[in-house]
Image: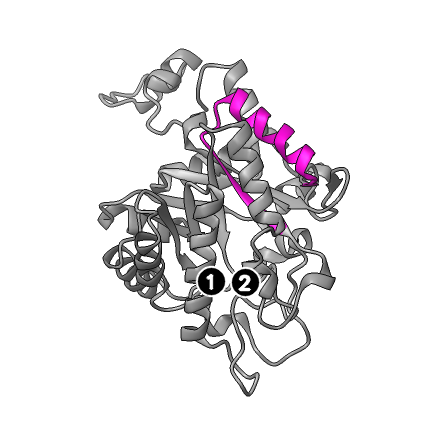
């Protein structure tokens, strides 16, 4: 017996009937222009895989240049370079961060010389260089991170990164007042065109572990929690305060980190921000997808793509993601966007 046809005037499924229709009415598109590829560099002779991040490498300088060549070929607009510093070069005040020929500065100079049109973003932070693994200098009693002393060093580091050729400096420390100080320092040093991408709302997340493996910045056995300077994951309104401060202090781009657990924050910030909004799909987000896919619990490519489209749909104008290269390859072989 044939089912009776319902008297339905509005049938949204009409526009889902074929792939062509679905593509025609799709609201959110992820293109290669939305991608920033984070890359790790270390003082080795060859690349090596980060154990907790399948497919992600610590690059030698030569290997880094090859990766940047791939980024350029695929049309990825920017790479973000993070140094993995030998433990012997670390100390409690991160002295090596300001060494004129340190690994990061060498890497930036090499990449900009070889690929001048590829945007290079550098991390303005001390955790790669400190023996205790914190993002700043410790107070005299060793019980906290000294905000103002850290900002002074970060401002010097940002200038040195700009001198090395960084197009965008990205303070990731969450110290108060660092955006204004860095902007003033860059301008005074003649780097008025160097942009600042602020980690404006960086949460004290459990998802950073694989990144800390990659750069060797796990904190030592001390009583200081990164929650004393990174944001409480339970807080929403605080994010708007942090972002507005950084916009007022002349950030050029604001970023939310992590991304997938904080889509509500990305949406809220993108609704009021008059400047571009970035999101960082962090190492733990990347590792979770890989782990579940390897166990056969999730479809790898569909989950990867859905995660990135969700971040873009939430309002991010650009996404730092370790999936950047493979997604760019998929886009280049397909229809130009996901």
According to the image, label 2 marks what residue? 126
Q: Nearer the viewer, residue 17 or 62?
A: 62
Are discs 1 and 2 less than 8 Å apart at CB?
A: yes
Residue 26's spot in the image, x, y percent? 35, 23
As drawn, the label of residue 189 is none
Q: Is residue 64 left or right of residue 176?
A: right
Q: Position of residue 30 (x, y in %)?
A: 42, 28
Say whether residue 35 is left or right of residue 249: right
Q: CA distance from mark 1 to mark 2?
A: 8 Å
- Kindly identify the residue that appears in the image at 46 percent across and 66 percent down: 153
Q: Is residue 178 magenta?
A: no
The answer to whether residue 260 shows anywhere in this view is no
Q: Furthest residue to the bottom? A: 141
Q: Earlier in the sequence, mark 1 or mark 2?
A: 2
Q: In the rendered view, tell whether residue 193 sits above or below residue 70.
A: below
The answer to which of 333 and 176 lies nearer the viewer is 176
């Amino acid at each position: 017996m044939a089912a009776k046809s319902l008297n339905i005037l509005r049938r949204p499924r009409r526009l889902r009937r074929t792939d062509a229709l679905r593509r025609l009415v799709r609201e959110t598109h992820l293109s290669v222009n939305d991608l920033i590829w984070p890359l790790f560099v270390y003082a080795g002779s060859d690349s090596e895989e980060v154990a907790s991040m399948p497919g992600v490498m610590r690059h030698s300088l030569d290997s880094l240049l090859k990766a940047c060549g791939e980024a350029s070929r695929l049309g990825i607009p920017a790479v973000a370079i993070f140094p993995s510093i030998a433990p012997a070069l670390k100390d409690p005040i991160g002295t090596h961060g300001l060494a004129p020929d340190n690994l990061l500065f060498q890497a930036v100079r090499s990449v900009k010389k070889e690929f001048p049109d590829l945007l290079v973003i550098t991390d303005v932070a001390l955790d790669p260089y400190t023996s205790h693994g914190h993002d700043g200098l410790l107070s005299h009693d060793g019980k906290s991170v000294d905000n103002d002393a850290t900002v002074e060093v970060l401002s010097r580091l940002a200038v040195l990164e700009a001198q090395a050729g960084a197009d965008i400096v990205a303070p990731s420390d969450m110290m108060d007042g660092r955006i204004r100080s860095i902007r003033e320092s860059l301008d005074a040093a003649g780097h008025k065109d160097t942009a600042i991408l602020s980690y404006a709302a960086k949460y004290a997340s459990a998802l950073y572990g694989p990144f800390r493996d990659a750069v060797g910045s796990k904190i030592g056995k001390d009583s200081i929690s990164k929650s004393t300077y990174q944001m409480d994951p339970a807080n929403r309104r605080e994010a708007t305060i942090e972002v507005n401060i950084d916009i007022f202090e002349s950030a050029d781009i604001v970023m939310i980190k992590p991304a997938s657990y904080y889509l509500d924050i990305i949406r809220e910030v993108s609704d009021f921000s008059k400047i571009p909004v970035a999101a960082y799909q962090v190492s733990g987000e990347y590792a979770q997808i890989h782990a579940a896919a390897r166990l056969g619990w999730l479809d790898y490519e569909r989950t990867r793509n859905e995660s990135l489209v969700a971040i873009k749909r939430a309002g991010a104008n650009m996404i730092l993601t370790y999936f950047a290269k493979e997604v760019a390859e998929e886009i280049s072989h397909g229809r130009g966007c996901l």
